[in-house]
Image (cartoon, rainbow, N blue to C red):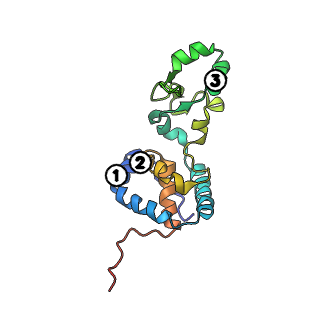
Amino acid sequence: MQSTTYQTDLAIISLTAQKKQEENDRFASSLQHQDTLALDRLVHGINKTVSAAIDCTQCGNCCKTLIINVTRPEAAHLADHLGMPLADFNDKYIEESQQGNCFMNTMPCNFLSENKCTVYTNRFKECRDFPHLHKPGFRARFAGTLMHYGNCPIIYNVVEELKQQLAFSDAPSAPAI
């Protein structure tokens, strides 16, 4: 990677995300021409470098702003870890939709303290996987990734580095003569 200094100021990231919304839409379209496997390899490499350089505990924004889906086995595991009966755990921390899906009942997350997860080694899969940049199928998931572009320093910096490495230019094309 060319740069080792990454933007982590959420105010700047949020403002930049608003300004770059149309650019990012055009970038999303340009990704449709990229080979899926090659793009995944590139994103995974960039993500590894960016994630290693950014300390999530300085931000914690994902834990403050995301609705976290929880499976029933995960709830049971964390309840056991906390030494709570599952019914008490669910009453205190879990909401259930009419469709039977479970999710954390508050934002920020009940288990966030001073930008750190108090149940980190037992956190939910959705928490472990965020921001999902290590997974295959980046191109197909890019619209979802952009939903968090203005809220997550890792996503923001990975997308910006990806633009550079793919030599993406948002300059309008010259009219054909």
- SS of the residue under disc 2: loop
Q: Which residue is mark 3?
A: 78
Query: Which label was assigned to residue 30?
Result: none
Choose between 58 and 139: the one closer to the eye. Answer: 139
Q: Position of residue 163 (x, y in %)?
A: 48, 64
59 sits to left or right of 49? left
Q: Amino acid at mark 1?
A: Gln
The answer to whether any part of residue 112 appears in the image is yes
73 sits to left or right of 31? right
Rounded to the nearest angstrom, the CA distance separating label 3 from label 2 is 30 Å
Q: Amino acid at mark 2?
A: Gly
Q: Which residue is mark 1?
A: 18
Q: Which residue is mark 2?
A: 150
Q: Position of residue 172 (x, y in %)?
A: 34, 72
Q: Amino acid at mark 3?
A: Leu
Q: Are the residues tagged 1 and 2 within 8 Å (C-beta)?
A: yes
Q: Position of residue 2 (x, y in %)?
A: 54, 65
